[in-house]
Image (spheres, rainbow, N blue to C red):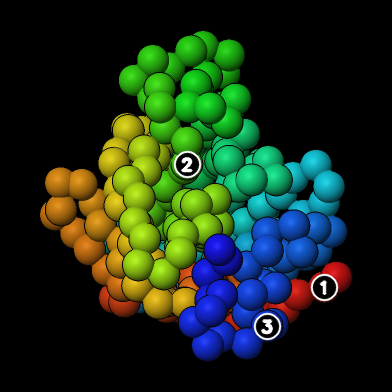
């Protein structure tokens, strides 16, 4: 059963929940604003028959200075992460990273196997709300359903990378309860029809978006 079926939601919502209809050969351009670091992000998302490509630029300022981050993600058609490349400029320090995955939880860092990340399917970049869309769209939960996910947590400014367990529960057609496990943080995230974040309390909001088919 698709989310929204037999729940009073109109037909157009059910069609949006069909991933093949939703993401084939389309492009999105989104701007997110950050509440915590006064950041701005311009994210381009392109889909085709082979997968989804994401290119994004973030600028902002934290307690230690102004930063600029560029990241690119390659996803398969099921929203599983295949690769992450990123670079950051923070306090005149330039850093780069490159990780690849087989989509089944096996990761490499510039060709070297990273055992501690085994079992992680998704990427979580705390500087952007985009990566919340990875489990949201990959899982496509029914309203009321929940799931634990293992993610590669990547702090792009410190270049610290670690495995992390998170939980997503779909509490309405466009809202998800997000929790760290063990639960030291939680938030109710509001999304649009494509599963992209509209509002992430205290952290981000979507200020503009456009879609081309």
Badge 3 or badge 1: first in the primary sequence: 3
Relative height, residue 151 to residue 140 (above, below): above
Residue topped by disc 2: 122
Q: Looking at the picture, how far across and down is residue 10, in whole percent? A: 62, 87
In this picture, residue 25 sits left or right of residue 166: right
Task: Give the position of the N terminus as an image quadrant.
Answer: bottom right
Residue topped by disc 3: 11
Q: Would you identify the image quadrant in which residue 50 lies? A: top right
Badge 1 or badge 2: first in the primary sequence: 2
Measured in 3D between alpha carbons, the distance from the residue under mark 3 to the one under mark 1, in whole angstroms, is 22 Å
Residue topped by disc 1: 212
Task: Give the position of the C terminus as an image quadrant.
Answer: bottom right
Q: Would you identify the image quadrant in which residue 192 lies? A: bottom right
Q: Looking at the picture, how far across and down is residue 197, in whole percent? A: 49, 71
Measured in 3D between alpha carbons, the distance from the residue under mark 3 to the one under mark 2, in whole angstroms, is 30 Å
Q: Looking at the picture, how far across and down is residue 166, in whole percent? A: 30, 48
Q: How crowded is mark 2: few (under 14 residues within 10 Å), some or many (20 or more)?
A: many
- Secondary structure at numbered mark 2: strand
Tag in front: 3 or 2 = 3
Residue occupying image coordinates x 50% and y 21%: 106
Relative height, residue 12 to residue 86 (above, below): below
Residue occupying image coordinates x 38% and y 54%: 126
Q: Which of 126 and 194 is in front in this view?
A: 194
Residue 8 appears in the rendering: yes
Badge 3 or badge 2: first in the primary sequence: 3
Which residue is most to the top? 112
Q: Which of 39 and 107 is in front in this view?
A: 107
Residue 176 appears in the rendering: no
In this picture, residue 129 sits left or right of residue 35: right
Q: Looking at the picture, how far across and down is residue 93, in whole percent? A: 44, 40
């Amino acid at each position: 059963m698709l989310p929204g079926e037999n729940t009073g939601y109109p037909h157009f919502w059910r069609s949006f929940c069909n991933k093949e209809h939703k993401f084939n050969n389309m492009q999105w351009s989104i701007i997110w604003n950050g509440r915590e670091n006064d950041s701005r992000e311009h994210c381009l998302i392109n889909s085709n028959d082979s997968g989804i490509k994401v290119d994004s630029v973030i600028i902002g300022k934290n307690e230690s200075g102004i930063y600029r981050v560029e990241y690119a993600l390659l996803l398969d058609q099921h929203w599983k992460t295949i690769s992450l490349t990123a670079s950051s400029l923070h306090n005149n320090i330039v850093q780069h990273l490159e990780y690849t995955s087989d989509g089944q939880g096996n990761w490499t860092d510039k060709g070297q196997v990273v055992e501690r990340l085994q079992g992680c399917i998704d990427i979580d970049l705390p500087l952007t709300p985009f990566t919340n869309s990875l489990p949201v769209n990959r899982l496509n939960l029914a309203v009321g359903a929940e799931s634990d996910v293992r993610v590669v947590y990547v702090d792009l400014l410190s270049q610290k990378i670690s495995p992390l367990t998170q939980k997503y529960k779909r509490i309405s057609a466009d809202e998800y309860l997000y929790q760290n496990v063990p639960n030291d943080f939680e938030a109710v995230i509001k999304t649009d029809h494509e599963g992209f974040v509209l509002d992430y309390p205290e952290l981000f909001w979507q200020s503009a978006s456009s879609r081309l088919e």
